[in-house]
Amino acid sequence: MTLNIIELKNVCKYFGEHKALIDMNFYVRRNEFVTLLGPSGCGKTTTLRLIGGFEHPTSGEILFEDTNIADLPPYKRKVNTVFQKYALFPHMDVYDNIAFGLKVKKMNKSLIDKKVKEMLSLVNLKGFEKRSIDSLSGGQQQRIAIARALINEPDVLLLDEPLGALDLKLRKGMQIELKRIQQRLGITFIFVTHDQEEALTMSDKIIVMKDGRLQQIGTPEDIYNEPENAFVADFIGESTIVDGIMHEDFLVEFAGCKFRCVDKGFGKKENVDVVIRPEDIKVVGSDEGMLVGMVQSVIFKGVHYEMIVKSGNHLFKIHSTKMAPVGKQVGLIIEPNDIHIMKKERVKDEE
Amino acid sequence: MKNKLIAYPYIVWMILFIVIPILLVLSYSVTYKSDTGLAFTLQHYKRFFDPLYINVLIHSMNLALISTLICLVLGYPMAMIIAKAPVRHRNMMVLFFVIPMWMNFLLRTYSWMSLLERSGLINKLLKLLQLPTLNIMYTNVAVVLGMVYNFLPFMVLPIYSVLVKIDKSLIEAAQDLGANESEVFLKITLPLSLPGVISGFIMVFMPAITTFVISRLLGGGQFTLIGNLIEQQFLSAGDWNFGSAISILMLILILLSSLVMSKYGKDKEGVGLW
């Protein structure tokens, strides 16, 4: 038996002319919390639906413990789904909703009773058995949907933007709770979201997607600190992206100034994207900086100030706990470690 | 204030053509002409409980029930097929169902007569194929056939409109939880479509139990149904009082059965009449 519980190999999915997924390849390890992350329309939900069995790939293989399940109907798969809008059955009470999967399996009544009780206590909704679905709040419906899926003891739980409809505070709470449930039960979670913060908070591994294509796979730290291209850098966290020229290994020029950096292996005078995180730019006196610019705007964000500084024709976004007033000349310092160089995406490659 | 104003025409209409006629029918049903003018009586109602008339009622209910059940058995799968069709085909399919209803009801029933007659189209075709001929004209079968034909759309449309509204993700959720196609149907689709079934049932059963045209044309007057009985009282027997009493009894019967049905359905949606 391999470590990979789910593996996608060269999976493509077309809806008529529309290419929803192009050559997806990734694997999910047992007990991993994996997040599919990307803007809407990037194919992340389609990927989840392929694993759930609601869609079948146009080409490629979906392996479940090394067996191709691409053409298996949903009810024969050992995965369960928590749907975006919960999809709780409105004509059943909470008990019948949660018990649905076990009743279909014809499990005996007292065992079902016991398991439903366990599930309700797992999601902190003890005593809700007889409640109707309409009488529950969004957060409670969410928990019931999770309980209904988990009671079947799936090997993999698929979650399609399950927290999308909840307000911010509830969402934060549910993030922690989901993570707790996942660790306690030791079930593999595949989670779909467009919220990068949610992805960073919860995941063991993040799969970033855009326009049906895979962009980067890695741990939250990898994805944040070492984004592979400008899209990932921009999508995960905030950043300033400027055009630059790579003069030689470890030397890049942008905003009219040459900088030491830690990247190498580019062609001579190659045009590159330079990505800098806002918290990595230090604001100093105008005579001490590597770049000099004028503060354009300042917004107080709570933990820090967000400033936009214009240097030459470039705007740099900066997060700093110290505020410089609008109109002031400041110097900017960027450490070699904090300069991320990325190959320009060639437009020709796209199609 | 404005809302009240625009409701007036309808209120006037309702009083003139619904409330007053019902009151008239009611008053006919409880009065008789005595020497001194009109007098109150319940004898018309009493008269109806004669086995002769009760049998007519039972017979009518039987035929209406059979027709309604056949409509349900034919209509439900039809509604499902339409609801599952791609959106761009759906309207076309519904249209095909509705187009016959745009043709005059009498005309349609007459055309069934010419189809079913001893020397009608169907029998000519059967003869041509050397098959035994069909003699169902002027039987219960013909009456039921006529009812099913005429009232089927009233069963299909309400079921269809409830089925299309069922959230597809509920079906997917059930599949996801291990239900195969027949389990999904029995546990999800069918219970969720019950409001449509109930309103379809009422919408077919009501005209079926009161029809007199279909039974007269296709039943040939041999099989008196409750509708024919009422018609006779008014047009040939001239006993308006008895005719009114039967009408009121039917009204109560339909009211009660609709109430029971909608209560059973308990869902607020779909049961169009209440």
Image (cartoon, grey):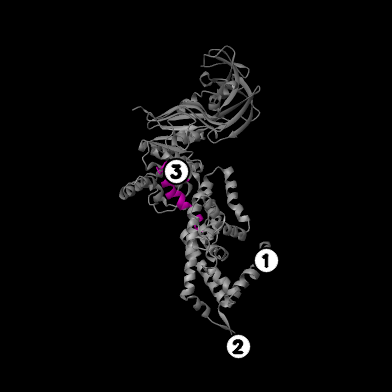
Name the N-terminal-most of marks 1 and 2.
1
Task: Residue at 54% x, 51% y: name it.
Answer: B125
Residues A266 and A257: in front is: A266
- Local crowd at mark 2 within 10 Å, few (<14), some, or many (≥20)? few
Residue B185 magenta: yes
Task: Residue at 36% x, 38% y: name it.
Answer: A185
Residues A151 and B106: in front is: B106
Horizontal and vertical percent for residue A294?
A: 64, 25
- Local crowd at mark 1 within 10 Å, few (<14), some, or many (≥20)? few
Q: Verify CB contact (< 8 Å) between mark 1 and mark 2.
A: no
The kind of residue tagged 2 is Thr
Query: Rounded to the nearest whole Å, what is the CA distance between mark 3 and mark 1?
Result: 49 Å
The kind of residue tagged 3 is Ala
Chain of the residue that carries numbered disc 1 in the rendered image: B
Q: Which residue is mark 2?
A: B36
**Residue B8, which numbered label?**
1
Chain of the residue that carries numbered disc 3 in the rendered image: B
Q: Is residue A90 visible?
A: no
Residue A158 magenta: no
**Local secondary structure at mark 2:** loop
Query: Rounded to the nearest whole Å, what is the CA distance between mark 2 and mark 3?
Result: 74 Å
**Residue B173, which numbered label?**
3
The kind of residue tagged 1 is Tyr
- Local crowd at mark 3 within 10 Å, few (<14), some, or many (≥20)? many
Residues A86 and B179: in front is: B179
Residues B227 and A241: in front is: B227
